[in-house]
Image: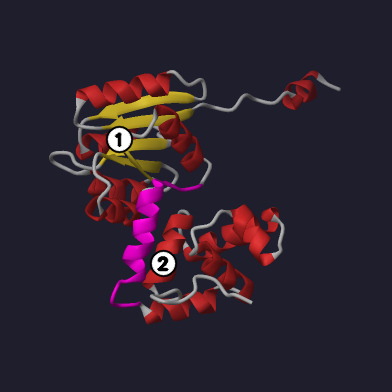
């Protein structure tokens, strides 16, 4: 084996996850900064005190994950999230707020946030959320997930045109998988229910998200309800 081959055979260490902290309170930024810097696989990419500074940061530096406060002056976290996820699709946002309220959670998720946690979450929960969204998954506080489903399930209007587009885009198996996602269950729970391997379910879920242009499974759940594919009083997944 040549020197070059030997060099190429050695695995390169994974780059740390570059995390930006956006919050208008210096004390909160300080606490989050210490949390990020205490983890070997995380690296501080920068800090910002409002949405405008957050935009400037992601436009000049590589940021993998943003811990985003939602209530900030000048430009709030929801508007900043929408712009960032549009301009920088690879950058994931974890929204952090003091309030577990519909007025904050649902707009943040629709704006493209891949995570939604309360600021009083334990440090290890926030760290794990960073790793999870960076891996392409979603993290939402359980109480928020339950109320998110209740909120969209009782929405008065359904987008039937979008529903028809979805049915035309997905294969029958993929459409079934979208309905399974609407339960909010994990891949392993869905796999047991539909008698498939977890790896197969993961593949189908990936196809559904890619074909529908969705960032994560939380957005898939919202879409299934908002289009009427799953509605009030309907079973989220086929029984039988």
Identify the residue at image location x=79%, y=21%.
6
Are circles 2 and 1 on residues that touch, CB within 8 Å? no
Asked if residue 97 lies left or right of residue 116, the reply is left
Q: Tell me the residue that label 1 is attached to.
A: 119
**Of the two numbered discs 2 and 1 in the rendering, the one whose residue sits closer to the viewer:** 1
Q: Where does residue 200 sit, x and y in percent of width and height?
A: 69, 58
Q: Secondary structure at mark 2?
A: helix
Q: Secondary structure at mark 1?
A: loop
Q: Quadrant of the N terminus?
A: top right
Kindly indicate the quadrant of the structure image that contains residue 28.
top left
Tell me the tag on residue 101: none
Left or right: 188, with 157 as reference point: right
Looking at the rendered structure, the number of numbered marks drawn on it comes to: 2
Of callouts 2 and 1, the N-terminal one: 1
Q: Is residue 56 above or below residue 76?
A: above
Instruction: Kindly identify the residue that appears in the image at 36 percent across and 19 percent down.
Output: 34
Nearer to me, 94 or 236: 236
Q: How was this image coloured? A: secondary structure
**Mark 2 closeness class: few <14, some 14–19, many ≥20 residues within 10 Å:** many
* The magenta stretch spans residue 157: yes
The front one of 197 and 208 is 197
| Magenta span of residues | 137-158
Q: Which residue is mark 2?
A: 223
Image coordinates of residue 158 in percent, x first then y, are 34, 77
- Picture quarter with the C terminus: bottom right
Looking at the picture, does residue 227 appear above or below residue 73? below
Please name the residue shown 53% across and 60% down the image.
Answer: 210
Evaluate whether residue 112 shows in this view. no
Nearer to us in this view, 26 or 44: 26
């Amino acid at each position: 084996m040549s020197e070059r081959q030997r060099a190429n055979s050695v695995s390169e260490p994974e780059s740390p996850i570059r995390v930006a902290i956006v919050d208008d309170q210096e004390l909160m930024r300080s606490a989050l900064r210490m949390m990020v810097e205490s983890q070997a696989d995380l690296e501080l990419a920068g800090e910002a005190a409002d949405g405008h500074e957050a935009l400037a940061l992601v436009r000049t530096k590589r940021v993998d994950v943003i811990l985003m406060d939602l209530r900030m002056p000048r430009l709030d976290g929801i508007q900043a999230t929408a712009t960032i996820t549009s301009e920088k699709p690879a950058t994931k946002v974890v929204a952090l707020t003091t309030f577990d309220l519909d007025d904050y959670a649902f707009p943040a998720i629709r704006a493209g946030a891949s995570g939604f946690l309360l600021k009083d979450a334990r440090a290890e929960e926030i760290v794990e959320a960073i790793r999870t969204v960076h891996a392409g998954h979603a993290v939402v506080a359980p109480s928020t997930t339950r109320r998110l489903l209740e909120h969209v399930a009782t929405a008065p209007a359904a987008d039937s045109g979008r529903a028809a587009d979805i049915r035309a885009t997905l294969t029958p198996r993929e459409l079934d998988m979208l309905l399974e996602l609407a339960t909010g269950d994990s891949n392993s729970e869905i796999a047991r229910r539909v008698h498939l391997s977890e790896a197969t379910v993961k593949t189908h879920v990936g196809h559904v998200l890619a074909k529908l242009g969705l960032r994560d499974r939380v957005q898939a759940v919202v879409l299934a309800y908002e289009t009427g594919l799953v509605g009030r009083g309907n079973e989220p997944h086929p029984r039988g």
